[in-house]
Image (cartoon, helix red, strand yellow):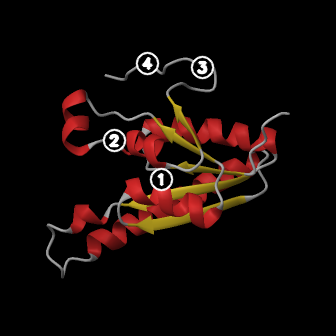
Amino acid sequence: MLQQYKRIMVAVDGSKEAELAFRKAVNVARRNQAELLLVHVIDTRAFQTVTSFDTVLAEQATDLAKESLTEYAETAKSNGVPAVETMIEYGSPKAIIAKQLPADKEVDLIMLGATGLNAVERLFIGSVSEYVIRHAPCDVLIVRTDLDNTIPKEED
């Protein structure tokens, strides 16, 4: 029996790695006639050191995420994925992507861009993709390559 996914979640954060995951997720969603859930998680820990009166940073992050998700959704729809949902969440990206959203939204495939962290950074802060692989209740696909399955060249 052929595996068919019904609800595919892809986390986007504006990085090149997330862009690769998004492009592949569009193709997988189209082939599976699946719903595509586009998620941007604003890590609230980044704002803990900022004084409480400076909510402008959080508002700017939200506005940028909304704008980005709108563009991603339009791109997905124009590429043959009619069912696209967007979400902005606040909190720990690891827990939200690995546990909360898969349960709440009945996600059966999570697609993420490969981390850009080096070994020392992973040791101290861990990567979201590594955490999701270990804790998600569904399949997880880590994307490293473009649509031609080649590793993108580093820009200087």
Is mark 3 in CB contact (under 8 Å) with mark 2? Answer: no
Give the CA distance from mark 4 to mark 3.
12 Å
Quadrant for the C terminus, please: top left
Q: Kindly identify the amino acid type of the residue bearing the numbered disc 3.
A: Asn
SS for callout 3: loop
Q: Kindly identify the amino acid type of the residue bearing the numbered disc 4.
A: Lys
Camera-nearest label, 3 or 1: 1
Question: Could you classify mark 3 by the number of other residues whose Cα lies within 10 Å: few (under 14), some (14-19), or many (20 or more)?
Answer: few
Quadrant for the N terminus, please: top right
Residue 99 percent coordinates (x, y): 49, 58
- The image quarter containing residue 134 is top left
In the displayed structure image, the side of residue 74 where residue 116 appears, left or right:
left
Question: Could you classify mark 2 by the number of other residues whose Cα lies within 10 Å: few (under 14), some (14-19), or many (20 or more)?
Answer: some
The residue carrying mark 4 is 153
Give the CA distance from mark 3 to mark 1.
25 Å
Which mark is first along the chain, 4 or 1? 1
- The image quarter containing residue 71 is bottom right
Residue 114 percent coordinates (x, y): 44, 33
Q: Residue at x 66, y 60 (%)?
A: 106
In the displayed structure image, the side of residue 2 where residue 37 appears, left or right:
left
Q: Residue at x 64, y 41 (%)?
A: 25
Give the CA distance from mark 3 to mark 2.
23 Å
The residue carrying mark 1 is 98
Question: Could you classify mark 1 by the number of other residues whose Cα lies within 10 Å: few (under 14), some (14-19), or many (20 or more)?
Answer: many
The residue carrying mark 3 is 149
Q: Kindly identify the amino acid type of the residue bearing the numbered disc 1.
A: Ala
Which mark is first along the chain, 2 or 4? 2
Return the residue nearer the eye: 148 or 7.
Answer: 7
Return the residue nearer the eye: 121 or 12.
Answer: 121
Which mark is first along the chain, 2 or 1? 1
Residue 52 percent coordinates (x, y): 18, 79
SS for callout 1: helix
